[in-house]
Amino acid sequence: QIQLVQSGPELKKPGESVKISCKASGYTFTNYGMYWVKQAPGQGLQYMGWINTETGKPTYADDFKGRFVFFLETSASTAYLQINNLKNEDMATYFCARRPLFMGWGQGVMVTVSS
Amino acid sequence: DTVLTQSPALAVSPGERVTISCRASESVSTLMHWYQQKPGQQPTLLIYLASNLESGVPARFSGSGSGTDFTLTIDPVEADDTATYYCQQSWNDPPTFGGGTKLELK
């Protein structure tokens, strides 16, 4: 079955960068793209974009163009989200989810931004 | 972007029937899906393509609708159904989520 295991919680200062991983198993990694979703504390789900795991091409939602980077380590069946120049409003839980239909989800990574 | 509107919260008693609604700002055909998120957990897919039950999801859950108006029904509600329920459309790009409906049991 689909299993997505994400890296652990992160505590960062404003201006730093963070890299979150999402390791897939139970299916052929390159056959299905990977979504990224943000959930701020006490808030709903916000679509960030997705990465084509066959070509490596990322697509970013408008609110996530610039400081957010999706990339892959295909040999390890792992997708990554990197957030550069962290801001207070980046404090949230970040989920990966397999396309299509957000069918399987990682457990989420809580990113805390505090000086 | 397509805006999905949900009622923020509902409170029902175990054994009752509950309907959770989702209205889209434009037609999404039947490309509407429903997710359950329990506190502290990741969301899970319940219903896809408006009315199809995801494997392993109890038959107490059902979905209906097309165009702009959709409904998730739980009948009967059990204590374990305490969660936030999100609708999500994939007809228009980008995919969007509703704000979520928090279901509490009395």
Image (cartoon, rainbow, N blue to C red):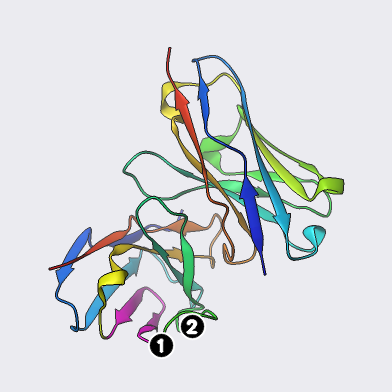
Q: Secondary structure at mark 1?
A: loop
State whether residue A92 appears in this view: yes
What is the x, y in percent for residue A8? 57, 37
Residue in the image at 27% along x and 72% along y: B20
Considering depth in this image, is B33 or B57 the residue closer to the camera? B57
What is the x, y in percent for residue A78? 75, 46
Q: Residue B63 vs residue A21: left or right? A: left
Considering depth in this image, is B9 or A62 the residue closer to the camera? B9
**Residue B69 in magenta stretch:** yes
Q: Secondary structure at mark 2?
A: strand
When the figure is inspected, residue A79 is found, relative to residue B60, above or below; the finding is above
Q: Which residues are magenta?
A: B60-75
**Which residue was labeled with disc 2?**
B53
Earlier-in-chain disc, 1 versus 2 = 2
Residue in the image at 75% along x and 52% along y: A52
What is the x, y in percent for residue B47? 46, 76
Q: Amino acid at mark 1?
A: Ala
Q: Residue B80 vs residue A107: left or right? A: left
Query: Which subunit holds the residue at mark 2?
Result: B
When the figure is inspected, residue B28 is found, relative to residue A73, above or below; the finding is below
Residue in the image at 38% along x and 57% along y: B3
Main SS of the magenta segment? strand
Query: Which subunit holds the residue at mark 1?
Result: B
**Residue B17 in magenta stretch:** no
